[in-house]
Image: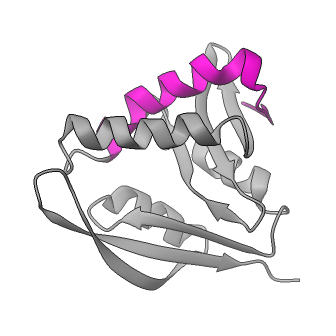
Amino acid sequence: MLIRAYNHEHDEASALDVFDRAFPAAHPFLGQLEEFESARKIIEVQLPVRTVYLAEDGHGVIGFIIIDKEGYIPALYVLPTKYNKGAGSALLASVQELSQRLTLHVFEDNSPAVGFYRSKGFRIVDEDRAVDGLGRGHYRLKMVRTRRS
């Protein structure tokens, strides 16, 4: 597996393809086209202006991570067919030296992701409630990992 820097001109379509396939698999509890479209627009805006790394296997891009200057990770997506094969771990490792403190939000209903982040040393520090397009509330967890010096 190769982790490399994102090049917007060459990699946007591949990253968005990963998002298009990974978002519904990670968020079946949302189940709304509006939720998907809103999240995709956020990704489209962030890809060209944030630090982004891609994970590739011998067949192409299988995942990506976005991080901002403050260490906030707004997105980490891996193709569902590549879960539990190390891509998420490698992507997270690729950004760990960029910030002393990494922060992210994850839906509580996305228990595989919550478990993954816990296994990587993240802890829950706060929670809020996000409301989807059908008016249903979903708990969103704020998780933090501080690098040991």
The reply, left or right, for residue 21 in relation to residue 89 is left
| Whole-percent x, y for residue 134 in the image | 10, 52
What residue appears at the point 47 percent right and 75 percent down from the top-left corner? 142
The residue at the point 62 percent across, 38 percent down is 64
From this view, report whether residue 7 is shown above or below residue 141: above
Of the 4 image quadrants, the one containing the N terminus is: top right
Q: Which residue is drawn at 78% across and 50% down?
A: 94
- Above or below, 19 against 88 in this view is above
The magenta stretch spans residue 23: yes
Q: Give the magenta-colored segment's residue range.
A: 1-26
* The stretch drawn in magenta includes residue 147: no
Q: Which is nearer the eye, 78 or 7?
A: 7
- Tell me residue 30's x, y (percent): 21, 49
Q: Quadrant of residue 107?
A: bottom left
Q: Is residue 110 left or right of residue 131?
A: right
Percent from the top left, x then y, of residue 90?
A: 69, 47
Between residue 130 and residue 146, name the one nearer to us: 130
Q: How many marks?
A: 0
Asked if one can make out residue 86 in the rendered structure from this viewpoint, the answer is no
The rendered magenta stretch, by its main secondary structure, is classed as helix
Check the image and name the residue furthest to the bottom: 125
Residue 97 figure quarter? bottom right
Q: Which residue is drawn at 22% across and 34% down?
A: 33
* Residue sitting nearer the eye, 23 or 40: 40
